[in-house]
Amino acid sequence: MMRRLADMQAEVLDRMPRLKAVEVALDDAVGSVLAEDVISPEDLPGFENAAMDGFAVRGAELEAGRREFRVTVDIPAGRFVSDPVARGDAARIMTGAPMPPGVDTVVQVEHTSVEDDLVTVEQVPVSGANVRRAGEDVTAGDVLFERGARLGAAEIGLLAAVGVERVRAVRRPRVAILATGSELVPAGRPLRPGQIRNSNSFTAYGQVLAAGADPILLGIARDDVEETRRLMAAALENDVVITSGGVSVGDYDFVKQVQEELGVERRFWGVATKPGKPLAFGVRGGTLVFGVPGNPVAAMVSFEMYVRPALLALQGRPDVYRPWFFAEAAEPVRGTKDRTEARRCRFTHEEGAVKFTTTGPQGSGILSSMTGAEGMFFVPPGYPGGDVGEELLAMLLEGSSTERPPFPGLQAS
Ligand code: AMP
Ligand code: MG
C-alpha cells in the first residue's frame, strides 16, 4: 500500500519519544535545543551607556542654545564615574562607557570640534540621542528563550551577554549511519569494474549534523545477511538508525528482513513520492529506524522529508518543518504519473514574484543537481504538465518552520 508523503511525515512525528535533558556549558550547547525556559538573570545593557564616541552633555542645554561646553572628565569603557557632570560641562565618553550622572545626550565626536578643554557642538542631536538605556535589550526576569529553542550563534551570544554559563539542553540524538551494498567502496580504495563510491554515508553525515544531532558512521554492510545483521545490531544501540539502500524489492535487499529479525516494528514501507519511494520506517523500543533508498538524491530527499523532522522533534523543537511558500515556475513544468514529485531548484525574484528553476536533470541518482539547490518544489501526482507561471508549493532546504507544508498527494487510503 503506497501512502502519501504528508501522512507518512505525520506518522513519523506521531508518538515521538523525547530525549533527556543534560546540563552543558555554553560552548557545548551550540546547535542544541533548550530543555527548559531560560530567565535572564541580568539586564542588558546592565547600565546606561554611550552608543557613540563623543561628548555627554545635557540635552536641555543644547535645546536652550548652548553650543560650548567645558570638558571636565574622560570616561573610557569600563570606568564608572559617580560624580555628576555640572551644568555647562561635558564628559568625553567612549562607546559602551557608563553615562555619568547629570547628562543624558551624547554628541558624536564627528559633530564637534575641540580646542583645549572646550568642545563646540557643530551638529545638534535630539535630546537623549546616542544613549543606550539599561535593560533596553533584555530585562532581568524576562524569559529570554523558551524550551524548544535552538541555540545558534546569536542565542549563545545573548546567553553569554546576560551571564548565563550553563544551560539545560536536550541530549543530542545519536544517529547511526549504515550504507548497504556490495558494490560500495570507501574512498581511498581503487574502484574495480562495477563498483561505486559510498556517498550516502557522507550526505547523511552532513544532514544529521545540520539537524543538531551526532552522526556515527558505521561504514558499509555488504549485501550479506550475516554482515547486515551484525552491523544493524550495533546500529540499533543508538537513538536513530539510518540505513541507505537495500530497501527495494531486489534479490539482495536484506535491510527490512534483518531489521524485523532484530525486533524492529515496521510502521510503514513505501511512499508515493519521487524520488524516495522505497522508504522504510520502524521503531525498536525508543530507537527510530529509517531505511532510506540507495539512490543518492532519493536518500537525501527522504532524509529531508522524514528523518530531519524526526530528529528535530526528538530534541523537542516545535519548528520541525522547512519554510515553504507558493512560487511560480520560471520554465515549463514536466508532468507526473502516480507519485508526488519533489524537484530540486533555485529561486529568483522577478516582478515581485518568487520563481523557481530546476538545478538540472532530476534523476534520483543525479547528485550534482542537489548541490546548489536552494529548495524543492512539489508537483502533484497526475499533473499533466504546466507552463511558465504555474504556481506550485516550494520549500527551502535551509531554516525551519512550525507550519507543516501542504504537500500535494493522493488522499490516504
Ligand atoms: P539499492 O536500493 O540498494 O538497490 O540502491 C539503489 C541505487 O543506489 C544503486 O544504484 C546503488 O548502487 C546506489 N547506492 C546504494 N547505496 C549507495 C551509497 N551508499 N552511495 C552511493 N550510491 C549508493
Ligand atoms: Mg543495494
Image: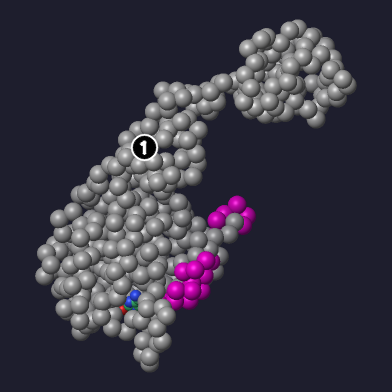
- Quadrant for residue 178, please give it: bottom left
Q: Note whether 231 is above or below 181 in the view shown.
A: above
Residue at x-position 37% and y-position 71%: 200
62 sits left or right of 202 in the view:
right
248 sits left or right of 400 in the view:
left
Residue 106 point in image, percent of width and height: 72, 21
Quadrant where the image shows the C terminus: bottom left
Residue furthest out toward the bottom: 193
Residue 67 visible in image: no
* Ligand 1 picture quarter: bottom left
Q: Note whether 407 is above or below 164 in the view shown.
A: below
Residue 251 point in image, percent of width and height: 20, 84
Of residues 393 and 167, the one drawn nearer to the viewer in this rendering: 167
> Does the magenta portion include 351?
yes
What residue does disc 1 label?
Answer: 167
Residue at x-position 46% and y-position 40%: 156
Q: Report helix, strand or loop for mark 1.
A: strand
Residue at x-position 48% and y-position 74%: 368
- Quadrant for residue 247, please give it: bottom left
Residue 2 point in image, percent of width and height: 23, 68
